[in-house]
Image: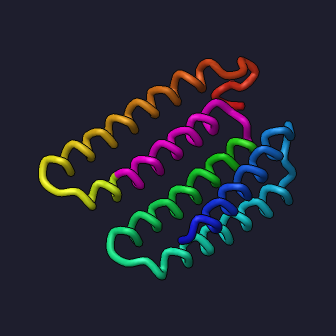
Amino acid sequence: MNTFNIKMITLAFGLAFSAGALAQSMSKTDYKASKDTISAEYKTGKAGCASLTANAKDICMAEAKGKEKVARAELEASYKPTQTSQYKALVAKSAAEYAVAREKCDDLAGDFKKVCIKDAKAAQTTANADAKVQTKRRDPILTKDG
């Protein structure tokens, strides 16, 4: 996938979710439209991976799937702003980053690959712990149940 497409997708996600974050509540129609947009952007990202081969294709697919999962989790957090949904969005982001890092490790061999995988797992563990702390520190109005 070329850099322009990646930048455009990133920009679209950023605009979609910055506007969603400003709104206190999201209508069901907006929610469904955003879900459709996320699905369309995933298909576009996935199609961009078709021209790649070997591990580059695997990395591209991991990035596309990760962006979709993160976008869906962030959409859910915007639609139902609870501590649980915020936490799930942060965990989805760390899982997506781990999946991409893990695929990038496949380009390495031997001890370098083992260290790379351990570093990726450690980064995910740290991000998950940070997510737990961040959601506990968020707005006290948000409760686990909403």
Vertical relation: 55 (above or below) 92: below
Which quadrant: the C terminus? top right
Q: What residue lies at 63% left-to-right and 39% top-to-bottom?
A: 85
User: Is residue 15 toward the left or the right of residue 52 in the image?
Assistant: right
Q: How many marks?
A: 0
Seen as rendered, the residue at the extreme front is: 3
Q: Give the image location of residue 91, x and y in percent.
A: 50, 40
Residue at figure coordinates x 33%, y 75% from the top left = 54
Q: Is residue 67 left or right of residue 110?
A: right
Magenta region includes residue 141: no
Q: Residue at x 54, y 73 (%)?
A: 46
Residue at position x 40%, y 30% in the image? 126
Q: How is the image coloured?
A: rainbow
As rendered, which of 72 and 13 lies closer to the eye?
A: 13
For residue 120, side relative to residue 85 (left or right): left
Against 21, residue 71 (above or below) is below
Q: At which x and y percent is residue 101?
A: 37, 51
> Can you say whether 66 is above or below 90 in the image?
below
- In this rendering, position of residue 55 left or right of residue 63: left
Considering depth in this image, is 77 or 144 the residue closer to the camera?
77
Chief SS of the magenta region:
helix
- Name the residue at the bottom extreme: 51
Q: x, y (%) of residue 104?
A: 34, 56
Residue extent of the magenta highlight? 80-101
Question: Residue 74 placed where, x, y %?
Answer: 66, 46
